[in-house]
Amino acid sequence: MTGIERRQYEMLVRVRNFGETNRALFGSSPVAQQTFAAVGAAIDELGAADMKKMSASASARADRREAARRTLMELVQNVAQLARTLRAEGRTLPAFDLPRSKSAMTLLTAGRQFAVDVAPFDADFAGHGMGAAHIASTTGAFETAMNSQGMSRTEHVAARARIRELMGGAIRCVRRLDLIVANDLHRDEVIQAQWKQLRRLEDPRTSRGVIDAPPPPAGTDTPAPQVA
């Protein structure tokens, strides 16, 4: 979520908690109950969408690719070292030359070739945790991490759009609650003060909060302030 969305999310949580704490106040209003429930459902979905967006972020993709690349590189280096040891003991094995290039495709090709070359000697290499199946699996994991960039970008855009959609719907629900609280509970000054406070969006860049205030009670002449 963006900074403003994070503050709006925190406000939504306060609204939900207010509805749960003061459930009795809205016992005769099915609309209020349904609207509070909708806010709660939006909060749950927003959390899930934000987690999905973060997991599909560029930095997360880069971290996964780098971790997979590092794992495969260490594996092929160990395979090459074991092959040298076995040849020194008189065994006849393929060269298992390490790639000179540091490109991802060169490393991927080396991993595939090592898996093929190890197969006839699988007992020796598997005994050291470097069997053909393990090499193939590690190579496949690196390939998947390489190819996930486009898909993750699509997922990131979709999650971002879903967050905007959910947030917009939740804010509309809160505006409906603004009217219910203002009209049905306008004589309760304590509740009015609590509602005004929980609807505040705190701006960390300033010493004052940015007010996302509800409209005034019905029957007053004060114009309603602009809300998010």
Image (tube, rainbow, N blue to C red):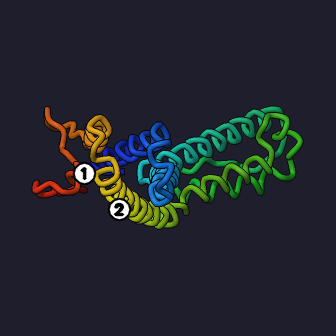
Local packing at callout 2 (Cα closer than 10 Å; few below 14, some 14-19, many 20+) is: some
The image quadrant that residue 167 belongs to is: bottom left
Is 180 in front, or is 213? 180
Give the Cα distance between marks 2 and 1: 12 Å
Local packing at callout 1 (Cα closer than 10 Å; few below 14, some 14-19, many 20+) is: many
Residue at left 70%, top 49%?
A: 95
Residue at left 37%, top 51%?
A: 1
Residue at left 35%, top 55%?
A: 180
What number of labels is visible?
2
The image quadrant that residue 140 belongs to is: bottom right
Label ID, residue 97: none
Q: Quadrant of the C terminus?
A: bottom left
Secondary structure under the numbered disc 2 in the rendered image: helix
Residue at left 40%, top 58%?
A: 170
Label ID, residue 214: 1
Circles 2 and 1: CB distance less than 8 Å? no
Tag nearer the camera, 2 or 1: 1
Q: From the viewer's perspective, tell me whether residue 65 is left or right of residue 175.
A: right
Secondary structure under the numbered disc 1 in the rendered image: loop
The image quadrant that residue 164 belongs to is: bottom left
Image coords of residue 19 (percent x, y): 45, 44
Q: Amino acid at mark 2?
A: Arg
Is 130 in front, or is 213? 213
Is 157 in front, or is 32? 32
Q: Amino acid at mark 1?
A: Pro
Give whichever of discs 2 and 1 has the lower sequence position: 2
Image coords of residue 203 (percent x, y): 21, 40
Image coords of residue 35 (percent x, y): 45, 57
Image coords of residue 85 (percent x, y): 75, 33
* Camera sees residue 103: no
Q: From the viewer's perspective, tell me whether residue 199 is left or right of residue 20.
A: left
Q: Which residue is mark 2?
A: 172
